[in-house]
Image: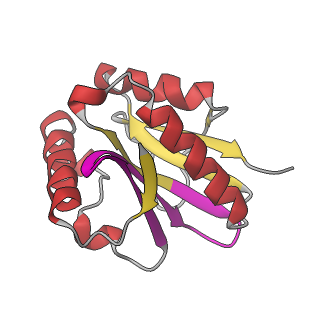
Amino acid sequence: MRIVEDDLSGPQIAEFLMEHVREMRSITPLESKHALDLDALRAPEIRFWSVLDGDAVVGCGAIKRLDADHAELKSMRTAAARKRGGIASLLLRHILTEAERLGFARLSLETGSAGFFLPARRLYEKFGFEYCEPFADYRPDPNSVFMTRLLRG
C-alpha cells in the first residue's frame, strides 16, 4: 500500500468519494452532513491523500486549512471491505505528520455522534484527539462530535 497526494482527477477516487457522500447522506440528516463533495475538495486550502493498494483506492483523507495554525481533518474513509485492516491508522499517522510539516499547531475534526461513527471516534482518541467545542463555522449539533489535537507545544 502507498499513500499519494491526489489531485482528484481520476475516476476511481471520484467514485470512492461519491460513495462516501451517499453513505453519509443515508446516515446523517442533511442539515448535519459536513462531508465535502469532489468539487469542494478541490479548493486551494485543501490537501488530499489517497491510499492505494495496487491501483485500487482503499482509503482517503484530507486536511483543510482554517488559518495559519489550525487545520481540519476531512474526508477520512476506508473501503468497506478493508475496514479494521490498519488503513485508517496508516493514513491518520501520515496526515498528522503532514499537518505538522505544513506548520499547523492544531488539527480538529467533526464526526458523527451516532453509533456508526464509534470506530472513528475510538481511532481519533487512540491518536490523541480530545473532545472539544465546535470550531470554525460549526455550531452545536446533536448529530456531531468535535475533537481536536495539538500538534506541537
Q: Which of 58/120 is in front?
A: 58
Residue 62 falls within the magenta-colored stretch: yes
Residue at image location 45% in from the left, 44% down from the top:
110
Residue at image location 18% in from the left, 34% down from the top:
27
Figure coloring = secondary structure
Instruction: State the image coordinates of residue 144 (x, y, percent, origin top left).
Output: 39, 38
Instruction: State the image coordinates of residue 140 (x, y, percent, origin top left).
Output: 45, 43
Tell me, yes or no, if residue 138 can be seen here: no
Determine whether, in the image, residue 43 is placed left or right of residue 128.
Answer: left
> Which residues lie in the magenta part?
46-72
Tell me, yes or no, if residue 19 can be seen here: yes
Determine whether, in the image, residue 111 is placed left or right of residue 122.
Answer: left
Chief secondary structure of the magenta span? strand
Say above or below: 111 vs 106.
Answer: above
Q: Quadrant of residue 11?
A: bottom left
Residue 143 falls within the magenta-colored stretch: no
Residue at image location 58% in from the left, 60% down from the top:
71
Determine whether, in the image, residue 3 is placed left or right of residue 132.
Answer: left
Residue extending furthest toward the right: 153
Q: Quadrant of the N terminus?
A: top left
Instruction: State the image coordinates of residue 132 (x, y, percent, origin top left).
Output: 61, 38
